[in-house]
Amino acid sequence: QVQLVESGGGLVQSGGSLRLSCAASGRSFSINRMGWYRQAPGKQRELVAHISSAGSTTYAASVKGRFTISRANRENTVYLEMNSLKTEDTAVYSCYADILELSTLQRYWGQGTQVTVSS
């Protein structure tokens, strides 16, 4: 069984920074893409950023230039560095990992971590 454990959420003032981490553990596996989604109350879940195993990144327009996604492949960990946070960044952030199993990709999710940005 694969588990994704997130850490790093919390309360921060507008303009501040937070760093989220998400570590995958369990049996031996090969991780393809990793990334982060977020969901604010009353809003649809949206993709924040994702990163390929080779390090290619994609960002939502709303966070581009402020957030940085990175990963440590040997530690099966993905990070999300969030700077210049705004109140509209308040949401539950969930990480995911696409893992190759029997020639197909299975998506696993973390439990979610709350990020609250106060004005």
Image (spheres, rainbow, N blue to C red):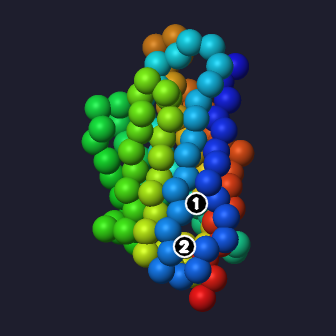
Is disc 1 placed on a helix, strand or loop? Answer: strand
Residue projecting furthest to the bottom:
119
Q: CA distance from mark 1 to mark 2?
A: 9 Å
Q: Is residue 57 above or below residue 53?
A: below
Residue 91 image position (x, y, % from top left): 63, 67
Q: Quadrant of residue 72?
A: top left
Q: How many marks?
A: 2
Q: Nearer the viewer, mark 1 or mark 2?
A: 2
- Residue occupied by mark 1: 38
Q: Name which residue type carries label 2.
A: Asp
Vertically, is 17 above or below 54? below
Q: Earlier in the sequence, mark 1 or mark 2?
A: 1
Q: Residues within 10 Å of mark 1 (few under 14, many from 20)?
A: many
Which residue is drawn at the image coordinates 68% and 55% (left, top)?
113
Proximity of marks 1 and 2: CB atoms separated by less than 8 Å: yes
Horizontal and vertical percent for residue 99? 51, 25
Where is 77 relative to 64, above or below? above
Q: Position of residue 101 (x, y in %)?
A: 53, 16
Dot 2: what SS?
Answer: helix
Residue 103 visible to the viewer:
yes
- Residue 34 % position (x, y): 46, 39
Residue 46 in view, yes or no: no
| Disc 2: which residue | 89
Q: Mark 2, residues whose alpha carbon is within 10 Å: few (<14), some, or many (≥20)?
A: many
Front-most of 27 and 41? 27
Amino acid type of the residue tagged 1 in the rendering: Arg
> The N terminus lies in which quarter of the figure?
top right
For the point 65% across and 19% down, which residue is it? Answer: 26
Q: Quadrant of residue 119?
A: bottom right
- 6 displayed left or right of 70: right
* Point 55% across, 53% down: residue: 20
